[in-house]
Amino acid sequence: MSTKETNKKSRILGTDIIFMNLPYLLFLAFLGVIYISNTHAAERKLREVQGLKKDIKEAKSDYISIQQKIMHGATQTELQRKTKHDDLKENRSIPEKLVVNRS
C-alpha cells in the first residue's frame, strides 16, 4: 500500500481527527469526572445537613418536654405536695418591711 492509500483510509476512519483532538477529549473527560464527583459531594453534604436538622428537632423537643416538667414541678401546689411529708408548711404571714435609718 502506498502512503496515499493509507492517508485516505485514515481520513475515512477518522483516526487522524481523533488523535488531533485527543487532548481536548481528555480535558472533557476530566471535566466530566470533576462534575460527577462534585455532584456526589453535594448530595453527601445535603444528607448530612438533613440528618443534623433531624437531630436538632429531636433535641428541641427534648428541651421543651424537660422544661415543661421543671415548670410543673415548681408550681405552688406541687411544692406543697412534695413537702407535706417533711412537715413543712406554707408561710401565710405578711412580710415585714425593714427600714434602716442612715444618719
Image (cartoon, rainbow, N blue to C red):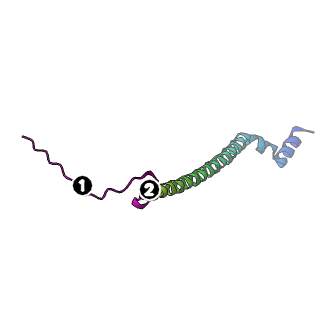
Q: Look at the image and give the residue range highlighted in magenta.
A: 74-103
- Mark 1 element type: loop
Residue at (9%, 41%) from the top-left corner?
102
Which-is-in-front pick, marks 1 and 2?
2
Residue extending furthest toward the right: 1
Position of residue 101 measured from the top left corner of the image (x, y, whole percent): 10, 44
Position of residue 86 measured from the top left corner of the image (x, y, whole percent): 44, 51
Position of residue 11 measured from the top left corner of the image (x, y, whole percent): 82, 46
Identify residue type, mark 1. Answer: Pro
> Which disc is residue 95 wearing?
1
Q: Which residue is mark 2?
A: 84
Tell which of 79 and 28 is nearer to you. 79
Q: Quadrant of residue 91?
A: bottom left
In the rendered structure, does residue 73 fall within the stretch colored magenta? no
Tell which of 92 and 32 is nearer to you. 92
Residue extending furthest toward the front: 87
Residue at mark 1 to residue at mark 2: CA–CA distance: 23 Å
Q: How many marks?
A: 2
Residue 56 appears left or right of 88:
right
In the rendered structure, does residue 92 fall within the stretch colored magenta? yes
Tell which of 82 and 32 is nearer to you. 82
- Quadrant containing the N terminus in the rendered view: top right
Residue extending furthest toward the left: 103
Tell which of 13 and 54 is nearer to you. 54
Position of residue 32 measured from the top left corner of the image (x, y, whole percent): 69, 47
Query: How many C-alpha atoms fall within 10 Å of the one at disc 1: few (<14), some, or many (≥20)?
Result: few
Earlier sequence position, callout 1 versus callout 2 = 2
- The majority secondary structure of the magenta stretch comes to loop
- Quadrant containing the C terminus in the rendered view: top left
